[in-house]
Amino acid sequence: MNRRDMLMGGGMLAAAGAALALMPRQRLLLLPEERKLEDLVPNAFGGWTTTPSDNFVLPRSEGSLADRLYNQTLSRLYIRPGQPPIMLVIAYGAVQNDQLQLHRPEVCYTAVGFEIVSSALRALSLGGTARLPVRDLEAVSTNRIETISYWTRIGDDLPTDGGSQRMVKLRQQMRGYLADGVLVRMSVNAEPSESVHQELAAFAVAMIRAIRPADRQALIGRDLAAGMVA
């Protein structure tokens, strides 16, 4: 065996060793398999109640790639007197890796003809020491405007953009585990304004507080769930 073959063989062995080291050996599921999103999120809380609707931009469709990414989805329209209806969409995937990962709204809305014209990050106070990072978007199509607030959870991490989402998955993989993930999205058919943003924020906080403390980790991770009662 010549020197060139030895170098190539050593490189292949090193690559194989690195791949083996990065192979996840544990699973982290913050939504137990027996728990359903339909049961997790109340139909009424904080003055909001559900009403039937199918006017949603959804992250999945029958037979699509996204249909295979998500184990559960929940879509509901909530109304409260004197306020615009709020569309809630929650999508849950039990596996988050390079092939299966949450589709952020910037991707979903663009795919169905919307343009994302603004994006901003803010933090919502959930009580105690818990601060939830939320991204606000304005999505515009030829006949519709939506103001959107959303967050994503992968394991206990809450990535705020596509780049940090990829880094979170890599960091978790290097730590030897594969986590589940959830996208929580709220939107209204209205142009962004201070009152609209306040309504979406109030809705998000009221919804999380209305969920049983033991179940909150499924939407916001264990650290924030614990911080709410710290």
Image (cartoon, rainbow, N blue to C red):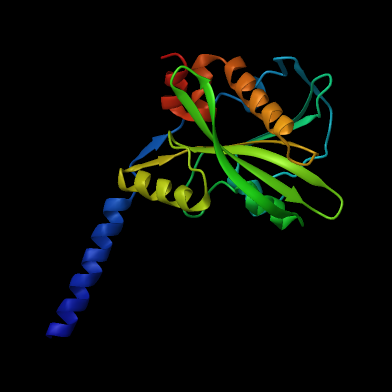
Q: How many marks?
A: 0
**In the rendering, at what x and y percent does residue 43 appear?**
72, 19
Say if 71 sits above or below 118 in the image. above
**In the rendering, at what x and y percent does residue 105 appear?**
64, 47
Judging depth in this view, the residue of 205 and 220 nearest the camera is 205
Residue under the image location 81 percent in, 29 percent down: 84
Left/right placement of residue 72 relative to residue 80 reads: left
Residue under the image location 64 percent in, 28 percent down: 201
Left/right placement of residue 94 relative to residue 71 reads: left
Residue under the image location 70 percent in, 46 percent down: 138
Residue sitting at the far right:
143
Q: Quadrant of the N terminus?
A: bottom left
Corner quadrant of residue 4: bottom left
**In the rendering, at what x and y percent does residue 190 appear?**
80, 39
Residue 61 seen: no
Say if 5 sits above or below 104 in the image. below
**In the rendering, at what x and y percent does residue 51 appear?**
83, 24
Residue 135 seen: yes
Say if 198 sits above or below 211 in the image. below
Q: Quadrant of the C terminus?
A: top left
